[in-house]
Image (cartoon, grey):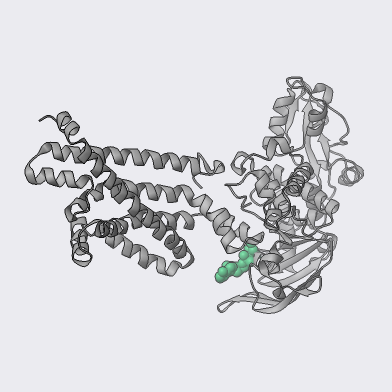
């Protein structure tokens, strides 16, 4: 689908990209990763011709992109940037439909596109379409940034550290969403990050770059097992050092890689305040606890919206669908439960049934690395 | 004669000069806008020239009005034409500078996004940069206008009429009534135009930008 052939780029005497070649298949989620300044953004921008290489060729579906008009090319490639860049003078609806309008789609069609896309990220049309970007939270803004990139149904989406500026909880949620969207809409995504956790949990294929060159291109599993260079190894272990306290024990427990930052609410909370909390923190569900702090269950935003009544307590809406594990259960067991579970996380409980933390796909990816690199200093 | 009696008896003369004053201000501001906004936008695309052009416009601003009028008198003669030429020159700087900075200060993330999603340079200019810079540009127009209302009183010196006519007549005949009949309406005119353009600025500021400058 996208093919780089010996791409080089230099500014003056400085070579930024050195003879890069690779190929991305249709529907693949490819993550470009590497240290700051290694040329990830430059590589990405050569695809939509925001940057023209000095040498080499790029083909999309077999067509040399330099033969196409750059403006028309860009309208067929979605583009999401870290700074979000929603137009502040346009409403959410106008921002999402900006490319369809450039392409002169009929008005009704534009509106349908906006309605369908907002549904995709659980932001009701009536409530959000007429807001301005400044009235949204950071996570909501970037959701709209992603929808703007999807609006004209481009087969390819380029994303440059799209979640880099968001807080960790929001980032996790958006990572889940983009992965879901990619599977559902079968997009080819090229995604830049410097965060190995993010790369491991999103990518079908990871391209590791350093100093303008590709060091390794492999699946996450393969990169974890056979890192192609010391720098990749150190990237993998750096992530792990940040993440856990490594107690030297060989056996890993659920508690070793759970995330302890969990949004908990008492079962006596009112529906409205829960919705407010969820939207301000950009999460879809909350952990609900009893008066004595023990775990009761979870409540999702859909459930409250479907069945909740304003002012009512959430107790009736709580379900125990999410699987729980004890903090001393083996990591393996926790992973198996997470993988076979419907939900995107499992809850870790203390011995006294209070909530200790939760394990998400991202924290699992981190733990996988730890299993392999746990002793690396 | 009291000021009130004077105003009543010279009502027509004051009104005539007031209208002429508004004409002088209106025409020179309009010309100033027509020159400065395109020039300002041009400079944002050719930043190397910007320093030079803005410095030149700044220098013009520091030349005393009387000196400029003297030049205009020698080069063009008397009447409205030389007065408008001089006032237009003075109107240029604030609008030019605000257009230039307004557009230059539009956050790079917006222009990066607009190019990246496939807007042409013109579409980026008209759909993104100008709307975001509009409040700043209108502030420039407001500054120019207030400023030109007072400079326009000098136009009376070279026979262009306007409220300055009354002031200069008063000064040369030691008649305070004449001076006040020129000075008070021009002060009020400045206040009213300032308010009106301020209102226009509020109305034309895109809703998403109100309350916070970006
Ligand atoms: N316009 C430019 N002129 C000169 N050097 C540049 C320019 N743009 C980027 N670079 C340099 O190219 C290198 C790669 O940049 P970039 O692709 O943005 O890195 P990354 O996204 O991996 O952090 C950096 O060292 C950067 O300083
Ligand atoms: Mg970058």
**Relative to A84, is A255 above or below?**
above
- Which residue is drawn at the image coordinates 78% and 22% (left, top)? A309
Q: Taking the image as four quarters, which one is ligand 1 found in?
A: bottom right
Give B100 or B152, whichever is nearer the viewer.
Answer: B152
Image coords of residue B182 (percent x, y): 20, 41
In the rendered image, the vertical position of residue A93 relative to residue A294, given as above or below = below
Q: Is residue B122 left or right of residue B5?
A: right
The answer to whether residue A37 is visible is no
In the image, taking residue A6 as reference, residue A9 lies left or right, namely left
Q: Quadrant of the N terminus of chain B?
A: top left
Residue B192 quadrant: top left
In the rendered image, residue A331, in percent from the top left (x then y), is placed at 86, 45
Image vertical order of residue A14 relative to residue A266, above or below: below
Please tell me how many numbered marks the rendered image carries: 0
Front one among B33 and A354: B33
Question: In the image, what residue occupies the spot 74% across and 66% down?
Answer: A208
- Any part of residue A205 in sight: yes
- Does A227 sit above or below residue A365? below
Horizontal and vertical percent position of residue A205: 81, 63
Q: Residue at x 78, y 26 (%)?
A: A289
Residue at horizontal 87 percent and vertical 30 percent from the top: A320
Residue in front for this viewpoint, A232 or B37: B37
The location of residue A353, given as percent across then percent down, is 83, 28
- Please indicate whether residue A359 sits to the left or right of residue B86 in the image: right
Left or right for B209, reference B147 = right
């Amino acid at each position: 689908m996208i093919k780089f052939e010996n791409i080089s780029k230099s500014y003056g005497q400085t070579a930024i990209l050195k003879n890069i070649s690779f190929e991305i298949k249709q529907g693949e989620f490819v993550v470009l990763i590497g240290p700051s300044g290694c040329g990830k953004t430059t590589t990405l921008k050569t695809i939509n011709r925001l940057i023209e290489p000095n040498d080499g060729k790029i083909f999309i579906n077999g067509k040399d992109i330099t033969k196409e008009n750059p403006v028309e090319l860009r309208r067929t490639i979605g583009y999401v940037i870290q700074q979000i860049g929603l137009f502040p003078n346009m409403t959410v609806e106008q921002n999402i439909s900006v490319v369809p309008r450039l392409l002169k789609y009929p008005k009704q069609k534009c509106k349908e596109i906006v309605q369908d896309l907002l549904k995709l990220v659980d932001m009701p049309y009536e409530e959000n379409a007429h807001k301005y970007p400044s009235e949204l939270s950071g996570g909501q803004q970037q959701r709209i940034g992603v929808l703007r990139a999807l609006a004209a149904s481009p087969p390819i989406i380029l994303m440059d550290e799209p979640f880099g500026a968001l807080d960790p909880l929001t980032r996790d949620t958006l990572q889940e969403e983009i992965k879901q969207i990619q599977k559902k809409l079968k997009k080819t995504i090229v995604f830049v990050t410097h965060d190995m956790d993010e790369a491991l949990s999103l990518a079908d294929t990871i391209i590791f770059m350093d100093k303008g060159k590709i060091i390794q291109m492999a699946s996450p599993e393969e990169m974890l097992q056979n890192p192609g260079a010391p720098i990749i190894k150190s990237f993998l272990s750096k992530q792990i050092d940040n993440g856990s306290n490594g107690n030297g024990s060989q056996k890993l427990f659920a508690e070793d890689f759970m995330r302890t930052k969990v949004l908990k609410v008492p079962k006596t909370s009112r529906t409205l305040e829960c919705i407010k909390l969820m939207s301000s923190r950009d999460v879809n569900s909350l952990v609900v606890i009893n008066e004595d702090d023990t775990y009761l269950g979870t409540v999702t935003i859909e459930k409250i919206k479907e069945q909740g009544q304003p002012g009512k307590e959430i107790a009736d809406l709580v379900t125990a669908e999410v699987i729980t594990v004890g903090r001393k259960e083996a990591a393996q067991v926790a992973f198996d439960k997470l993988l076979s579970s419907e939900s995107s996380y499992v809850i870790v409980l203390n011995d006294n049934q209070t909530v200790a933390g939760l394990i998400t796909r991202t924290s699992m990816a981190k733990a996988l690395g730890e299993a392999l690199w746990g002793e690396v200093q | 004669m009291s000021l009130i009696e004077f105003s009543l008896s010279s009502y027509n003369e004051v009104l005539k000069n007031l209208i002429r004053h508004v004409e002088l201000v209106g025409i020179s501001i309009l010309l100033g806008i027509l020159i400065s906004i395109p020039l300002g936008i041009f400079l944002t695309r050719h930043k190397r020239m910007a320093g030079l052009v803005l410095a030149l416009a700044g220098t013009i601003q520091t030349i005393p009005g009387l000196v400029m009028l003297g030049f205009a008198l020698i080069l063009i003669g008397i009447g409205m034409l030389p007065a408008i030429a001089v006032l237009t020159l003075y109107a240029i700087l604030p609008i030019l500078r605000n257009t230039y900075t307004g557009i230059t200060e539009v956050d790079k993330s917006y222009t990066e996004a607009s190019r990246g999603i496939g807007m042409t340079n013109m579409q980026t200019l008209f759909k993104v940069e100008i709307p975001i810079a509009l409040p700043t540009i209108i502030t420039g127009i407001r500054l120019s206008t207030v400023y030109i209302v007072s400079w326009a009183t000098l136009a009376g010196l070279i026979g262009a009429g306007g409220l300055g006519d009354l002031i200069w007549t008063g000064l040369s005949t030691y008649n305070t009534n004449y001076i006040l009949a020129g000075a008070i309406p021009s002060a009020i005119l400045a206040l009213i135009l300032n308010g009106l353009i301020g209102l226009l600025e509020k109305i034309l500021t895109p809703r998403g930008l109100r309350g916070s400058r970006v």
